[in-house]
Structure formats: C-alpha cells, structure tokens
Image (cartoon, rainbow, N blue to C red):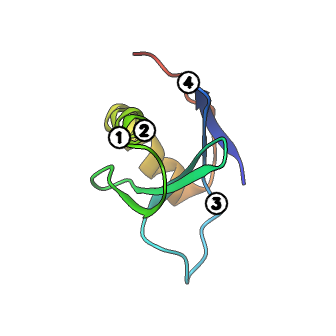
Amino acid sequence: MPVISRFCGITIKMYFRQKEHNSPHIHATYGEEIGLFSLKDGEMFEGDMELRYQQKIKAFIRKYRDNLLTMWENQRFEKLPYEE
C-alpha cells in the first residue's frame, strides 16, 4: 500500500483499487490508531482514531481531494505535502 503523505505522526496510505473494495477512501494510522476516511466527505467510516487526528486528516482530504480522487482512479500514486 503506497504512502501518500506523513504529517504530525499520521501516515496516509491508499490501497490499489479492487472491485470489491469500498468507495474511494484513504487509510490513516497514528501509532496503534487506525481509520478509513471517505474521499467524498472526509469522514471516518471505520476505525478508532482520536477526534483531533480525524480533524487533521479531514483537512488534508479537503485540500487534496482532487489529487486523491485522481490517484484512486488511475492508480498512479504520488507523495503529497502537508501544510497547515
């Protein structure tokens, strides 16, 4: 699973798309905490990540939504910087 970005101790990854895989989303980890986040609205739909990290990830998705959706569709992954 390629790493898309790392910031504030959070790692953002994206799986290669599979037919049975969920709608467009990213996987985020912070230590032992994990979360799956929708690219549509940035909401965590699975996981146990603290709210403060969820908010940072949601902001990241808002900023890079177009890039992330393009990566989801074409499977050409790139590193994205994090800027607050």
Reading the chain from its start, which is encountered first: label 1 or label 4?
Answer: 4
- What x and y, as percent, mark residue 75? 61, 55
Given the image, on which type of amino acid does mark 1 rest? Answer: Lys
State the residue position of label 1.
Answer: 58
User: Is residue 21 rendered to the left or right of residue 61?
Assistant: right
- Label 2 – label 3 distance at C-alpha: 17 Å
Q: Residues within 10 Å of mark 1 (few under 14, many from 20)?
A: some
User: Is residue 51 rendered to the left or right of residue 31?
Assistant: left
Residue in the image at 30% along x and 56% along y: 40
- Label 2 – label 1 distance at C-alpha: 4 Å
Q: Residues within 10 Å of mark 4 (few under 14, many from 20)?
A: few
Residue in the image at 56% along x and 56% along y: 74
Please tell me whether residue 54 is drawn above or below residue 38 in the rendered image.
above
Outermost residue, bottom direction?
A: 20
State the residue position of label 3.
Answer: 15
The reply to whether callout 2 and callout 3 are in contact (CB within 8 Å) is: no
- Label 2 – label 4 distance at C-alpha: 10 Å
- Callout 4: SS: loop
- Callout 3: SS: loop
- What x and y, as percent, mark residue 44? 38, 56
State the residue position of label 4.
Answer: 8
- Label 1 – label 3 distance at C-alpha: 18 Å
- What x and y, as percent, mark residue 68? 46, 45
